Amino acid sequence: MGDLTDQAVAVLLLSLRIAPTLSFAQPFTLLRIPAMIRLILAITLSAWLVSGNPDATWRAPFWDAGLPVVVLGELFLGISLALALQLAFAALLTAGRAIDIQAGFGLAVLVDPTTRAQMPLAGTFFAYAGAAIFFAIGAPGDLLAIWAASVEKVPLGAASLGGDPAPLIEYMGTVFLMAIGLAGIVLLVLFLLDLIVAFLSRTLPQMNVLLLGFQVKALATIAALPLALSFSGALFARLMRTALETMPRLI
């Protein structure tokens, strides 16, 4: 009876390591999945990890550390793992927001039906393209491997509330640089159009260059954005791989 209790508690505790990624991190939040299904999936995956790693989970002396401390430690570790994916997609949304502002779409936003949040127009395309690449490269299987490796590296009850922020800072700079690279083609086109419009405003002051600039840049964005997405598949994949490679460093 005691072993069953330890296993049940270990499953619930270890689910705190998995649930933040499934519940709050993109691309999973881009899918319209009920919260109860996400919770059941997290508990199921936790039970799978517990059954495969008994010595590092329910047989580990996690009771000695105190249940509240273990809960906080597991939740902090789960949030740290989810943060890598969150930052990758935040970089994509930021790059899309830069395109929106440059193209004159700054006031245009889309409401995500899943999160009910306002998302940038171009950033939405980047986010869903990143999600498609994420599933296409088999990243969910890599996530399972990362969670399994985290159990071996940090047994239940051994998670701490601190860590080295250096890998996270380095990772943030890398993913935001990659995201700007994804939007670089569109931003370059819009910058050149701004130069042309500025030249026209000097030579033909009687023209309504502001209105003309908005129209031209909107058409240019519509034409250049598909090209940027189609030629950036490798960079999307590299961005997702960088996120997955950084997650074990945050454990």
Image (tube, helix red, strand yellow):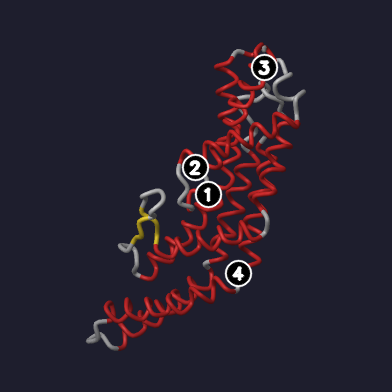
Instruction: Say which quarter of the image contains residue 11.
Output: top right
Q: Position of residue 204 (x, y in %)?
A: 28, 88
Q: Nearer the viewer, residue 105 or 69?
A: 69
- Is label 2 in contact with label 1 (beta carbons under 8 Å)? no
The amino acid on which the numbered mark 2 sits, given as a three-letter code, is Phe
Mark 2 lies on a secondary structure that is helix
The amino acid on which the numbered mark 4 sits, given as a three-letter code, is Ser
In the image: residue 59, left or right of residue 174: right
Mark 1 surroundings within 10 Å by alpha-carbon count, few (fewer than 14), some (14 through 19), many (20 or more): some
In the image: residue 36, left or right of residue 133: left
Q: Nearer the viewer, mark 3 or mark 4?
A: 3
Instruction: Identify the residue position indicated by label 1 in the image.
Output: 28
Residue located 70% across and 16% down the image: 3
Q: Is residue 44 above or below residue 162?
A: below
Q: How many marks?
A: 4
- The label number, if any, that marks residue 62 in the structure image: 3
The amino acid on which the numbered mark 3 sits, given as a three-letter code, is Phe
Instruction: Identify the residue position indicated by label 4 in the image.
Output: 232
Residue at mark 4 to residue at mark 1: CA–CA distance: 22 Å
